Image (cartoon, rainbow, N blue to C red):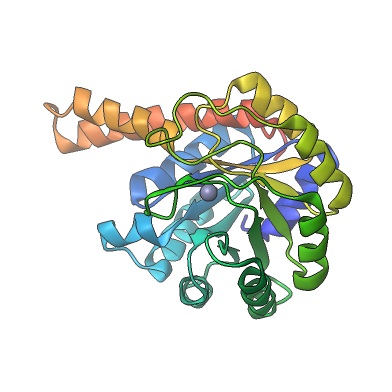
Amino acid sequence: MEQKMKDLLAGAWEGKYAVPAICVSNMESVLACFQAARAARSPVIIQSAWSEMEPQMITYADLAGLIRCFGARFAEVPFAIHLDHGMSEEECMGALAGGFSSIMYDGSAGSYEDNVTVTRRLRRAAGAGGTLEAEVGRVGGAEGGGGDFEIVKSDPEQLRDFLEKTGADAIAVSIGNFHGSHGVHKGAPKLDFELLARLHDVCGVPLVLHGASGIPEADVRRAVTMGICKVNYYTQLYNVYMDCVRDNCGETMEECMGRATRVLAGEIEKLMDMCGSAGKA
Ligand SMILES: [Zn+2]
């Protein structure tokens, strides 16, 4: 059953687990999310960014409709539909108009003042039923289809100020995590747990870990006990997915894509176990 993202995150906050947020942009990836959530008895956040949708010629309304279509078939699965990395106010408004109930505004590339101003406007636009995630500091790496951004760690004082001024429902933190697995940021990300504890202390809202691919499992589990309630996954899932497609591209389309969807669902199920959301639906 569809839920508000903030309600899924409130359950995670209470229960000290995180809900995996899985990037999708086609039917196979959406189906894999629901298959995994059913098997693991887990809630799931199903998200996409415009940079993932545009190459596949799919619109916000198309994707929201597709997710709700599977949502009816997997009626026992609690899910939310979320825009990952809205890079502009227009992208965020487009997602809301297309039926997404939750948006992330990523103002991390601009000035702090602009991030506050736009986040506050979008919080109002999302309304009481909507959820708004924002970013303080900059996660860095390859994000939103763009190039390679330097990491700027989140500052606890700035976070306190940001929450007062914007009313954001969830905050993406920069604590040594980064997007993608290429470019200037090579090797496994090293999380700054001391900083995470300080951010959690000043912050009454759920925290979000972006760029979780490649972070050692023990570190993800530890972060989840320290206020991380949503963990975003893209790179590690689609590396496995595309490896499966490449290894089996001699099969028929139906066999090849079906196999890749099952492999993807299996990988998502492992993440639900790692995040502690398995068994929570
Ligand atoms: Zn991100």
Looking at the image, is 43 positioned above or below residue 263? below
Quadrant of the snapshot with the N terminus: bottom right
Can residue 133 be seen here? yes
Q: Is residue 4 left or right of residue 28?
A: right
Location of residue 206 with respect to 4 vertically, above or below? above
The answer to whether residue 226 is seen in the rendering is: no
* Residue located at (66% from left, 19% from top): 218
Taking 218 as reference, is 229 above or below it?
below
Q: Nearer the viewer, residue 18 or 99?
A: 18
Q: Position of residue 261 (x, y in %)?
A: 35, 35
Image location of residue 59, percent across then percent down:
36, 68
Residue lying farthest to the right in this orientation: 201
Residue 225 sits in quarter: top right
Residue in the picture at 29% in, 34% down: 258
- Which quadrant would residue 231 be assigned to in this image? top right
What number of labels is visible? 0
Nearer the observer, 30 or 20: 20
* Snapshot quadrant of residue 183: top left
Q: Residue drawn 40% across and 62% down?
A: 50
Query: Is 65 left or right of 280, judged from the image as shown?
Result: left
Q: Is residue 243 left or right of residue 265?
A: left
Q: In which quadrant will I find the C terminus?
A: top right
In the image: residue 67, left or right of residue 199: left
Where residue 199 appears, x then y in whole percent? Answer: 80, 45
Give the x, y percent position of residue 168: 73, 65
